[in-house]
Amino acid sequence: DYKLLQYEVNQDANERIKQLALKNNTKVIVNTAPYVEVDDDFYKNLYMVTPNEVEAEAVTGIKVDNFENAKNAAAIFREKGVENVLITLGSNGVFVSDGNKEEIIDSFKVKTVDTTGAGDAFNGGFLAALSEGKDIWQAAVFANAVAALSVQKLGTTPAMPSREEVDKFLEERTN
């Protein structure tokens, strides 16, 4: 149902994969990391983009340092043809905009050891939640939990939590 792209691969490949996905009614999500400049046409017909605040500024020219600026950056992504915008804000949470509703979902407060891979953890968790039928708001909370768990350990792959860890973390923090 979803295809997650990012900029660590050849952009020609991303373009081709996007076209194939859209042709097959697959929703395309682009994690704009690591940031590279791409043609604005690439943003047309995307289901969602998931930049962090630095990447959002690079694409839109707006410093995303508060809610109002996040809304303005989301509007620019929408003008480029993106349906939904999610901007990760590190320890400040995640800004989510679906065109009707815009809000910042708070991050979970944890002791941070290493933020390397937190964006990947977030995006993986977000996509997993969407694939299970959660809406983007529920998926953002789930993804925040995955990222919060990942930053408590050193490294990238070894820091990625298991599903059981995420479910337990959410149960403890949301009940």
Image (spheres, grey):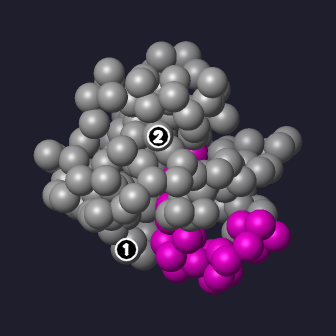
Question: Which span of residues is magenta-colored?
Answer: 48-70
Report the quarter where the C terminus lies. top right
The label number, if any, that marks residue 145 in the structure image: 2
Secondary structure under tag 2 reads helix
The quadrant where residue 12 appears: bottom left
The answer to whether the residues at label 1 and label 2 have Cβ atoms under 8 Å apart is no
- Residue 69 versus residue 5 in the image, above or below: below
- Residue 43 versus residue 19 in the image, above or below: below
In x, y percent, where is residue 27? 51, 32
Q: Foreground residue, 115 or 80?
A: 115
Q: Residues within 10 Å of mark 2 (few under 14, many from 20)?
A: many
Between disc 1 and disc 2, the foreground one is 2
The residue type indicated by label 2 comes to Ala
Disc with the residue nearer the chain's start (1 vs 2): 1
Name the residue: 45% across, 54% down: 110
Q: Residues within 10 Å of mark 1 (few under 14, many from 20)?
A: some
Name the residue: 74% across, 42% down: 98
In this figure, which residue is indicated by the disc labeled 1? 36
Q: Is 115 left or right of 37, judged from the image as shown?
A: left
Name the residue: 50% across, 76% down: 54
- Marks 1 and 2, how far apart in space? 27 Å
Report the quarter where the N terminus lies. top left
